[in-house]
Amino acid sequence: MAKIELSNIAHTYEPTVENPMYALKKLNMVWEEGGTYALLGPSGCGKTTMLNIISGLVRPSQGQVLFDGVNFTEYSTPARNIAQVFQFPVIYTLMTVEENLDFPLKCRRVPEKERKKRVREVAELLNLSDKLKRPARKLAADEKQLISLGRGLVRSDVSALLLDEPLTVIDPQLKFEIRRKLKTINERYGLTMVYVTHDQNEAMSFADTIVVMNNGEVVQAGTPQELYEKPETTYVGYFIGSPSMNFIKCHLDSGRLSTAGGSIPLPSSVSVPEDRKNLKLGVRPRFVSFADPGAQRALKGRTEMVQEFGNYRIATVRIEEDIVRLKLSPGAEIPADDAWISFPESKICLYANDVLVNGNR
Ligand code: ATP
């Protein structure tokens, strides 16, 4: 296990081009020893590039990769002692499941007794115990991926376990179970784990820290709760949460936030922004509720749509150009036309030019 630092890292795949595109723009990032991290972002934002820079599969165009403070930038992948699991299974087809799991230990000359113990432990964890003697090629795709995962987990000496969308081919029921097991492994062995995904639910249920990326940049790193409650940009507010955060255009008027549906007082915790342009009030759907017509601190709109999801319902209210979604309990009443909505002051986030306003953190 190790603390891993990316110091002033940037990367382009077009080093000879005059004005190259940067897959990763200059950034600093620390992965603490024993932490569970998710790298979350849309396709092409640079997640895999970052993971491959940590493992040594990609040499960064700029900056340094430090393991426990030592510069490993020039070191090969094997010298970094990293286990990496990819999106699709990488297994030895001519070996049995047991031989596949044992192989990384055998290569490192781990004593046989210890090898047997580790293989048994990992097989049990991944529900592969009864398949140990079977040829790996005869297993289904999701079971083959479990072998890849097992090969990453079987070594106790790795600096970190890097997982690049490892559960894509796994059945949804099993996905949840495996994520839970990865958490158990982290607790038991204290492994530093970095898990790449574009699925926020996967990230939320796996990681202690989520690193949200966009367009080659880290836009916010924090706990699932921090990202949910205080997204630092409207991008994170949109990307995290289902439905995403609501944004209502507003401007400051005599200490109030004035919207197309009426005005509400500027929350006392928010300092008046210097930059008053392009202000948006952000609030999560589950903090919005319907209010009595004309109620104080309520905004007026019109109900546009109601969607049933069994254990909750989503009401969509339009306030001129803005759409506000409310996440309500199954039996909640929803006004048919004119609708007044309100939300607690403490749940309001204010954004200027799509960045959370100071004093709102
Ligand atoms: P995905 O979720 O689709 O795998 P990602 O977030 O992991 O995407 P990367 O694979 O790191 O993103 O890609 C970042 C950018 O770098 C993209 O524009 C991609 O096209 C480009 N890129 C990635 N690998 C290479 C490569 N080997 N050669 C050239 N360009 C590349």
Image (cartoon, helix red, strand yellow):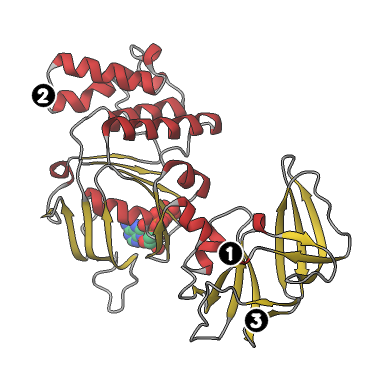
Q: Secondary structure at mark 3?
A: strand
C-alpha distance separating marks 3 and 1 = 15 Å
What type is the residue that disc 3 sits on? Arg
User: Of discs 2 and 1, which sits in the foreground?
Assistant: 1
> Which residue is at a point 35% across and 32% down the rendered structure image?
149
C-alpha distance separating marks 3 and 2 = 70 Å
- Seen in the image, is 244 located left or right of residue 32? right
Which numbered marker is on residue 346?
1
Position of 318 relative to 125 (above/below):
below
- Residue 282: quarter of image: bottom right
Q: Position of residue 305 (x, y in %)?
A: 81, 58
Q: Quadrant of the N terminus?
A: top left
> Which residue is at a point 35% across and 26% down the rendered structure image?
147
Where is mark 3, residue-wise?
Answer: 256
Where is mark 2, residue-wise?
Answer: 109
- Seen in the image, is 91 located left or right of residue 285? left
